[in-house]
Image (cartoon, rainbow, N blue to C red):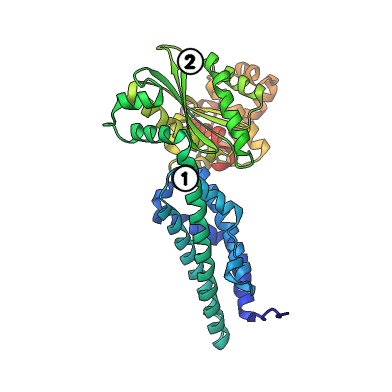
Amino acid sequence: MKRPTRQPDGLRLVVQRILRDHEALIGSVAVDMRTRVPELELDSDPRLRDLIEAGTTDNLLAALDFLQSDATADRIRVPARAVDFARVVAQRNIPLSALIRSYRVAHAAFMDIAMDYAVELTGEQSSAVIIRLVHRTAQYIDQASEQIAHAYEAEHARWVDTRSGPLREWVRRILDDRDTDLAAAQHALGYSLSQRHLAATVWSGPEVSASQTASAFGSLRDILAPILGASGMLMVPIDEHEARVWFAVAPGSTFDPATVDRALAARALPIRLAIGGYGYGPDGFRDAAHRADRVRAVALIARTPARMVTYYHHVAALTLLSADLEALRAFVAEYLGGMAADDPRAERLRQTLQVFLATNGSFAATAQELRLHRNTVHYRVQQAMELLGGSPEDLHQNLHLRVALYAAHWMGSAVL
């Protein structure tokens, strides 16, 4: 039996340093991918960012294991989460070339850091480590790229062959090209574009199976159509865990968001919903869908799965403010001061102050809405004032404070 080859001590040191700094490496790779592989749409889609970071992390660990082992290249297996990302990319019809380029970007970032560590070694030890790094990582990327390409192509063929394939293509044309033949599109979709629409995006988390997701999506019509007064619905999958939805609704009709919340909660569906509001005709079809996308982005950044439904009219300003999350976080810290802490006490103070301002500084109305004793409201407002400085009268003039409270309420720890 062949005994394992003893690897250079320097290689072990390089691997240890990479593992120690792996979070920074993954962060650097993520930034590179967002700028160098724009087709992946990582800038606009937090869910895709989470998926690719998970796959990149697993690939890094697998590559480091291969780097230190004597395994032959045919023993390399791409991690499951990396394959999952490839399947989602295929379902979204993102070009395979973009997916493969993301592997080259990750490989280059890895080699930059690994080489920096390797050249710090001395003499022959450094040379031996560099040679092994170049040889083994090239083998890993070659095998991984081939397996990922096979997974992509198989999923793309399966996904395109489903009935929803043509529907997705027609919806893509309508959303991206205003010169699309609308009569042909309506015929293919079986849905009129000339009416009033309510658009939404619905999705499930990675922990929910594809079959559970499909079942939950299928329940939406029965649950929401009566509440919305919808005469029809168009649902088009984006991938196995996400879909666009349009409801055909009567002019002037409205609905109670609380009723939607209760109806979905009662069924305990493992999904989340971003509602982009109403629109008329083909332009409204597009605009409401794009608003739903922006609402979904806010909901994903906020990372509050307890909130099943997020509505455009609740977070409209945040769909703009959250485009620069670092700047928004700094803004919240500046105007909330000590109340920008991510802890239960600060959250209670923020909630009380937000309601206090919304009720025109009424202690009685705040106590009633929050179901607190009036003295408790007095105490909390006083605590908030001590953290902020100034007087309650000053607060009413402070638009920036209101915006900061609003951002903290909806986005929580993402901006704190």
Percent position of residue 129, x then y: 56, 79
Q: 217 and 301: which one is in front? A: 217
Residue 330 visible? The answer is no
Q: Residues within 10 Å of mark 1 (few under 14, many from 20)?
A: few
Do the numbered discs 2 and 1 sit on residues whose CB atoms are within 8 Å? Answer: no
Residue 157's mark?
A: 1
Judged from the image, the secondary structure of the residue bearing numbered disc 2 is strand
Judged from the image, the secondary structure of the residue bearing numbered disc 1 is helix
Residue 107 visible? The answer is yes
Residue marked by disc 2: 230
Q: Residues within 10 Å of mark 2 (few under 14, many from 20)?
A: some
Q: Is residue 27 above or below residue 133?
A: above
- In the displayed structure image, the side of residue 182 where residue 128 appears, left or right: right
Q: Quadrant of the N terminus?
A: bottom right
Q: Quadrant of the C terminus?
A: top right
- Image point (45%, 42%), residue name: 92
Q: 391 and 362: which one is in front? A: 362
Q: 305 and 371: which one is in front? A: 305
- Image point (32%, 26%), residue name: 184
- In the displayed structure image, the side of residue 295 where residue 271 appears, left or right: right
Residue 149's mark?
A: none
Q: Is residue 301 above or below residue 145?
A: above
Q: Amino acid at mark 1?
A: Ala
Q: Amino acid at mark 2?
A: Ala
User: Looking at the image, which residue sits at the far front?
Assistant: 161
Q: Quadrant of residue 258?
A: top right
Between the residue at mark 2 and the residue at mark 1, the CA separation in whole angstroms equals 34 Å
- Image point (58%, 59%), residue name: 78
Percent position of residue 3, x then y: 71, 80
Give whichever of discs 2 and 1 has the lower sequence position: 1
Mark 2 or 1: the one toward you: 1
